[in-house]
Image: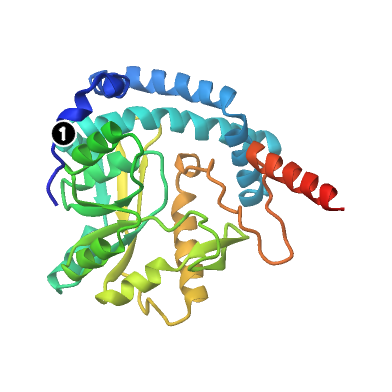
């Protein structure tokens, strides 16, 4: 897949604010890591203060997933989740504007032999991971050993879409829009390594309920269907920052045997259990501010407070019901 070309209309004044933002991100990547760490922590503190709904969603998720911890301990985790969210800006800037070689001595990887063996056998590889705070940087460092295709959500702003795609194609092989299933299938049939994240709640379409940290979560069955396309080797991938250092680790599991099994619930349960075990290695580097349990099982209700627009919908529905009565 070729990098996109810069179209003249993207240089018009209406897009200058987006270009200024890109310039700021480039400048951030030039800073020493010690300064990036301090600034990222400050931004994370600000996010913790300002993003009330996201903070509350994080509290709910951690209460559900770590019930054995004291409330004070979970609140410290909430703060650290947003500190890592602040660092995401800098780690993404580093991925976009630093050379991958910068991380050669700062990056450790284990399990690479599993991927090499699958490739030697002529198989495509489906890497299943989760939404960690340094996703772009993880792919950048992985490109020192292998390039993957990534599945992503397109940006509405065309400048951000151009920059995100062009920067990512420095270390990704293909960047496939989330809805472009044809390209995703073509990648697997072409023997590519595809990086896919099945850890978000997209409702009940093409999904089953499976346990995740002891809670029933709507889990997409797309990995099961993708694995059937080309008998792909399905492996779990994990990466995390080692403390506050500029050192990172990545691990690749052995291919899941008997996957897909023919039982979508069993497959989803197995993948969720594997991702859970990996997330526990560095739990606050996971993006807990997503509403992982927003789709409730039959007879249940979502554990999160309603969003303002949901409250408005409920009020409007109640008003219409009263008018009809």
Give the residue at x 56% y 67%: 210
Q: Tell me which residue sits at (84%, 48%) in the image.
A: 322
Colour mapping? rainbow
The correct choice, above or below, for 246 with respect to 42 in the image is below
Q: Is residue 246 visible?
A: no
- Tell me if I can see residue 23 in this picture: yes
**Residue that mark 1 sits on:** 7
Q: Position of residue 134 (x, y in %)?
A: 35, 39
Between 230 and 2, the one nearer to me in the picture: 2
Task: State the image coordinates of residue 77 (x, y, percent, origin top left).
Answer: 57, 36
* Foreground residue among 102 and 58: 58
Residue 80 location, x and y as percent? Answer: 52, 32
Residue 269: percent from the left, percent from the top? 51, 69
Disc 1 on helix, strand or loop? loop
Asked which quadrant contains residue 137, the reply is top left
- Specify whether 72 is left or right of 129: right
Q: Based on the displayed image, in which of its 4 quarters is residue 30 positioned?
A: top left
Q: Is residue 198 left or right of residue 174?
A: right
């Amino acid at each position: 897949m070729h990098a996109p070309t810069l179209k003249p209309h993207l240089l018009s004044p209406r897009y200058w604010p987006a270009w200024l933002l890109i310039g700021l991100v480039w400048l951030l990547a030039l800073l020493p890591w010690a300064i990036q760490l301090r600034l990222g922590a400050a931004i994370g503190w600000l996010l913790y203060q300002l993003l009330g709904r996201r903070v509350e969603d994080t509290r709910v998720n951690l209460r559900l997933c770590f019930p054995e911890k004291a409330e004070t301990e979970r609140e410290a985790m909430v703060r650290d989740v947003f500190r890592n969210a602040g660092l995401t800006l800098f780690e993404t800037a580093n991925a976009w504007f630093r050379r991958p070689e910068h991380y050669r001595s700062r990056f450790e990887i284990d399990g690479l032999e599993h991927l090499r063996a699958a490739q030697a056998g002529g198989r495509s590889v489906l890497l299943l991971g989760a939404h960690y705070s340094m996703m772009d940087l993880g792919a950048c460092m992985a490109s020192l050993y292998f390039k993957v295709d990534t599945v992503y959500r397109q940006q509405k702003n065309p400048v951000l879409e151009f920059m995100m795609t062009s920067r990512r194609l420095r270390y990704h092989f293909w960047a496939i829009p989330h809805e472009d299933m044809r390209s995703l299938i073509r990648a697997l049939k072409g023997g590519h390594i595809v990086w896919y994240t099945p850890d978000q709640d997209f409702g009940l379409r093409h999904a089953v309920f499976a346990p995740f940290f002891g809670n029933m979560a709507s889990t997409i069955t797309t990995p099961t269907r993708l694995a059937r396309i080309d008998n792909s080797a399905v492996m779990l991938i994990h990466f995390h920052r080692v403390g506050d250092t500029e050192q990172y680790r990545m691990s690749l599991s052995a291919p899941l045997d008997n996957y897909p099994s023919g039982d979508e619930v069993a497959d989803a349960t197995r993948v969720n259990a594997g991702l859970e075990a990996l997330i526990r290695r560095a739990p606050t580097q996971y993006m807990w501010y997503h509403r992982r349990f927003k789709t409730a099982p039959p007879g249940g209700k979502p554990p999160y407070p309603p969003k303002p627009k949901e409250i408005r919908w409920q009020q409007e529905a109640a008003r219409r019901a009263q008018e009809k009565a």
